[in-house]
Amino acid sequence: MGKVVLSYSGGLDTTVCIPLLKEKYGFEEVITVTVDIGQPEGDVIEAEERGRKYADKHYTVDAKNEFVKSLFMLIKANGDYEGYVLGTSIARPIIAEKTVEIAKKENADAIAHGCTGKGNDQLRFENIYLQYGFKVVAPMRELNLTREWEIEYAKEKGIDIKVTKDKPWSIDENLWSRSVEGGKLEDPSYLPPEEIFSWTVSPEKAPDEAEFVTIGFEEGVPVSIDGEKMDGLTLIKKLNEIGGKHGVGRVDMMEDRVLGLKARENYEHPSATILITAHRDLEKLVLSRREIRFKKFVEEEWAELVYYGLTNDPLFDALNAFIDKTQERVTGWVKMKLYKGTAQPVARFSEFALYSEELTSFDTTAIDQRKAEGYSVFHGLQGRLYREIMRRLGK
Ligand code: ARG
């Protein structure tokens, strides 16, 4: 059967895939590809070690900078699907593209992934693999495997993986977010135990003193913290740390998967919460009310395309073009207050502000207030007519 390239995280599912691809599918050579998108460094190293140990050949590809580029677009789009900041979703096409590059280089016969047939990731990966004409192999889905079975099988194959039956969390982590699902969390009425969190402290344990951070934006993209310029990777990492200390960015939610299954998800993403909240605030200062209202529809569509793994749809390019146009004036800064699990904008500034203190202030006379009287005569006219007619007709 030849060669297969496997998108490899180093976790249980994908590691179990390695022997399965040989035993059950008859591949002679399994090549693992781990894409570094800012997951904890230890995970990348561990994946590399395991890849070298269990597969025939291993590649680690650094895609952190490309990932940051996608995240910048996500920030401009206030990326949000049902309250989820799309961390896993937006990383998948990049991982898939990188895997395809290796598959082409290696002249592979197929590409495999370790996704189940119940989630979104299978769709996101395969959309890209198929785009390049690769045959897809999905052992988890095709063999209808359960995590219990995998844990047993791994043991049997001498694969050392930390997952145990009482801590069977399925974790997906990258620069933008950490998601935890599975195990007892699958019961939506079960309270998440503190042990599932690793980026954030619980708000109760956060400092009693608030911390303020000022985020500088240029054309919708965050470029500085407290006036200090830095690259996106450093900036996002730094805010994860600062926000995590204050318990910012924990989300426990029900989510509608593409297939229609509802899933209970726990997320941690301090940086995402801080940056999107700040970015939205700045937009409120500089965009017109019609721009903001229309952009909301665009954002909803944008987020759905990302969630569904359909970023190769021409609509995605068109939406991005619209979003980029709106961001030309989203330059300025927002001061955020981090306190016991919350991140609130408390001050903001932009040269492009569509705000005039001169006009709006209680204390100025730049506008003659009496002019509003004429406006007021017409405002609500139809509603008043309607009420009057109904009263007259006794309805
Ligand atoms: N529900 C999210 C998504 O579909 C995250 C899934 C993450 N996977 C995991 N094994 N924790 O994008």
Image (cartoon, rainbow, N blue to C red):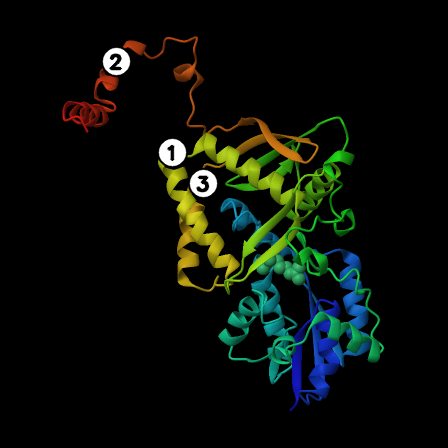
**Residue occupied by mark 2:** 373
Q: Do the residues labelled 3 and 1 touch (CB within 8 Å)?
A: no
- Residue 172, given in percent of the width and then of the height, sits at 68, 59
Q: Do the residues labelled 2 and 3 touch (CB within 8 Å)?
A: no
* Vertical side of 336 occupied by 17: above or below: below
CA distance separating discs 3 and 1: 16 Å
Q: Residue 328 carries which label?
A: 3
* Vertical side of 50 occupied by 37: above or below: above
Per the image, label 1 sits on a secondary structure element best described as: helix
Bin the neighbour count of mark 2 within 10 Å (Cα to Cα): few under 14, some 14-19, many 20 and up.
few
Q: For ligand 1, which image quadrant applies?
A: bottom right
- Residue 331, given in percent of the width and then of the height, sits at 51, 35
- Residue 236, given in percent of the width and then of the height, sits at 66, 45
Say which residue appears at 61% left-offset and 54% top-offset: 87
Say which residue appears at 78% left-offset and 35% top-offset: 205
CA distance separating discs 2 and 3: 36 Å
CA distance separating discs 2 and 1: 23 Å
Which quadrant, please, contains the N terminus?
bottom right
Q: Along the polypeptide, which appears first: circle 2 or circle 1?
A: 1
Near-viewer residue (335 or 259): 259
Bin the neighbour count of mark 1 within 10 Å (Cα to Cα): few under 14, some 14-19, many 20 and up.
few
Which quadrant, please, contains the C terminus?
top left
Per the image, label 2 sits on a secondary structure element best described as: helix
**Residue occupied by mark 1:** 289
**Tag 2: amino acid:** Glu
Say which residue appears at 41% left-offset and 51% top-offset: 321
Bin the neighbour count of mark 3 within 10 Å (Cα to Cα): few under 14, some 14-19, many 20 and up.
few
* Vertical side of 106 occupied by 369: above or below: above
**Tag 1: amino acid:** Arg
**Tag 3: amino acid:** Glu
Say which residue appears at 70% left-offset and 78% top-offset: 31
